[in-house]
Amino acid sequence: MKVITQRELAARSKAVLDDVEAGEIYHITRNGTEIAEVRPLGARRRFVPVEELQRKWRHAPRIDAARMRTEADEFFAAEDRIGDDDNPWERT
């Protein structure tokens, strides 16, 4: 990500848009405050079809809730836990 001023954008708009087309992201500032972001249109989608998610996640590793709980307890300390039966994967 690059940060440029509004004046730089006006003076170098062709070069900036060429960079954006190549994948670069720019933050534009006015009076030292970031006011806008210029990014390629295809960089982020709001909707992903279910079929695409299923295809991408088909080979993802399975989540081991007990192992994840143990690792979280080691990292965050077990005494901060809400309850021993607080397993979101087993809620009904």
Image (spheres, rainbow, N blue to C red):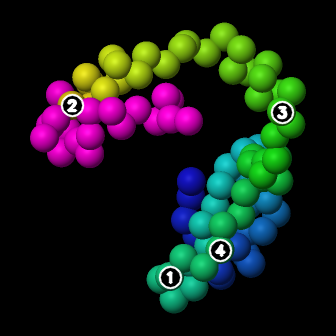
Q: Which residue is drawn at 47% across and 83% down?
A: 32
Of the pair 52 and 1, the residue shown nearer to us: 52
Label 1: few (<14), some or many (≥20) within 10 Å?
few
Estimate the x, y position of residue 57 in percent, counting from the top left. 69, 20
Q: How many angstroms separate mark 1 from mark 2 (CA)?
A: 41 Å
Give the numbered dot on residue 36.
Answer: 4
Q: Indicate the position of residue 72 as horizontal and vertical percent values.
A: 27, 31
Residue located 74% across and 48% down the image: 44
What residue span does the magenta drawing correspond to? Answer: 74-92
Q: Which amino acid, by three-letter code, is at mark 3?
A: Val
Q: Does the magenta stretch include residue 91?
A: yes
Contact flag, marks 4 and 1 (Cβ < 8 Å): no
CA gap, disc 1 and disc 3: 39 Å
Ranked by sequence position, the earlier of labels 3 and 4 is 4
Q: Quadrant of residue 9?
A: bottom right
Does residue 18 appear in the picture of this structure? no
Q: Mark 3 or mark 1, which is nearer the start of the sequence?
A: 1
Q: Dot 3: what SS? A: helix
Q: Earlier in the sequence, mark 3 or mark 2?
A: 3
Between the residue at mark 4 and the residue at mark 2, the CA separation in whole angstroms equals 41 Å
Residue sitting nearer the eye, 36 or 17: 36
Which numbered disc, 4 or 2, marks the residue closer to the eye?
2
Q: How many marks?
A: 4
**Residue 76, label in figure:** none
Residue under numbered circle 2 = 73
Q: Which residue has dot 3 on it?
A: 50
Residue corresponding to mark 1 = 33
